[in-house]
Structures are given as structure tokens and as C-alpha cells.
Amino acid sequence: MTPDEIRAKFLEDHAHLRGKASVLRSLACQVLRGDSELTEAMRLKGRDMQFCLIKHMQWEEAKLAPLLRSVNTAAADGADQLFEEHRGQRAKLADSLIALEGADDGDGTALAEHLLSLIRWLERDMQTEEKAILMWIDSNREPQHTPRRHTPRA
Ligand SMILES: [Fe+2]
Ligand SMILES: [Fe+2]
């Protein structure tokens, strides 16, 4: 993959995760409003979002981290930071998977609250990650050619 392809796939994965988070948020809010029959659908979507995130982190480690290491020293430190952050995220996800597979809490509200908090954490994390990663990748990019605009003479 070229650096541009890696950059595009990174953003595409985040957009995909945001889409899943948005569907899940809507389900969790409905469960909190009393639609407890949606609990199992919410659990399934929660599981799906978590597996999607795990796959994404594996991809970042396999493709994005080597690219960062090739950019410059600051970006290479960023690759180390990526692995460090993923360690924390995996621990959080492991706890979350236990909550997801846990015993039914009756009306699904505890699980809905848990998933809403997970979504807030994921969205914050993606935002912070994008800011840092794009800065590192773009610090090594050729400046984009912008066609000169023709200004008619007065
Ligand atoms: Fe990540
Ligand atoms: Fe990410």
C-alpha cells in the first residue's frame, strides 16, 4: 500500500466505525427509553462494533505503524505511542466484552449505559488519533499541486 492509500484506509476505517457507533447509539437510546425488546439487537451491534475496532487496531499495527516508522523520528515515536495506546484499549475492550456477554440485566439499561460510555470513549479516541497520525503522515507528504488560478487583467 502507498502512504496515500494507508492514509485513506485509516480515515475510511474511522468513518466506518463512526457509522457503527451511530447505529449503536440510537439502539442504546431506544433501550434507555424503554424499548427493552431491542436489547439483543443492541448486544449484537455492540459485539460487531468491538470486533470491527479490534480488526482496525490490528491493521493499524500492521500497516500504519511501519509507515510512521519510515517518516521521521517524531512519527516513529508516534508508532510506539500507537502500540502503547492499543494496549490500554485492548484492556478496556476485554472488560467491555465481558459486559456484553454478561448475564441479562433485565431491561438492558445497564448494558445500554455501558455501550454509550464506550462509544464516547471510542469517538474521543479516534479524534485524538486522527489529529496526531495525520500530522505525522502529512509531515512527509509532497505539497499538493494546486493549479494556479487565472486572474483576468483589468
Ligand atoms: Fe488505534
Ligand atoms: Fe484508529
Image (spheres, helix red, strand yellow):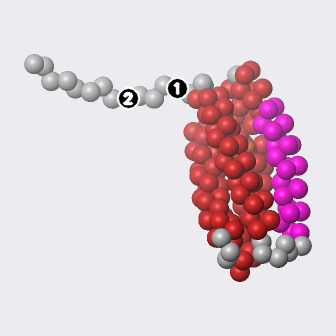
Q: Quadrant of the N terminus?
A: top right
Across the whole image, how many numbered discs are drawn on residues?
2
92 in relation to 130, above or below: below
Measured as percent of width and height from the top left, residue 102 is found at: 89, 69
Q: Position of residue 83 (x, y in %)?
A: 82, 38
Disc number placed over residue 75 in the picture, else none: none
Q: Tell me residue 5's x, y (percent).
A: 59, 43
Left or right relative to 125: residue 85: right
Q: Residue at x 45, y 29 (%)?
A: 144
Q: What secondary structure is marked by label 2?
A: loop
From which residue to which does the magenta span run? 80-102
Residue 13 seen in this snapshot: yes
- Tell me what residue is drawn at x 78 percent, y 54 percent: 54
Magenta region includes residue 97? yes
Q: Is mark 2 within 8 Å of ligand 2?
A: no
Q: Badge 1 is on which residue?
A: 142
**Residue beneath the point at 72% across and 61% down:** 49
Report the quarter where the C terminus lies.
top left
Q: Amino acid at mark 2?
A: Thr
14 over 85 or under it: above or below: below
Q: CA distance from mark 1 to mark 2?
A: 12 Å
Depth check: 110 or 86 in front?
110
Quarter of the view holding residue 71: top right
Which kind of residue does numbered mark 1 sit on? Glu
Q: Quadrant of residue 124?
A: top right
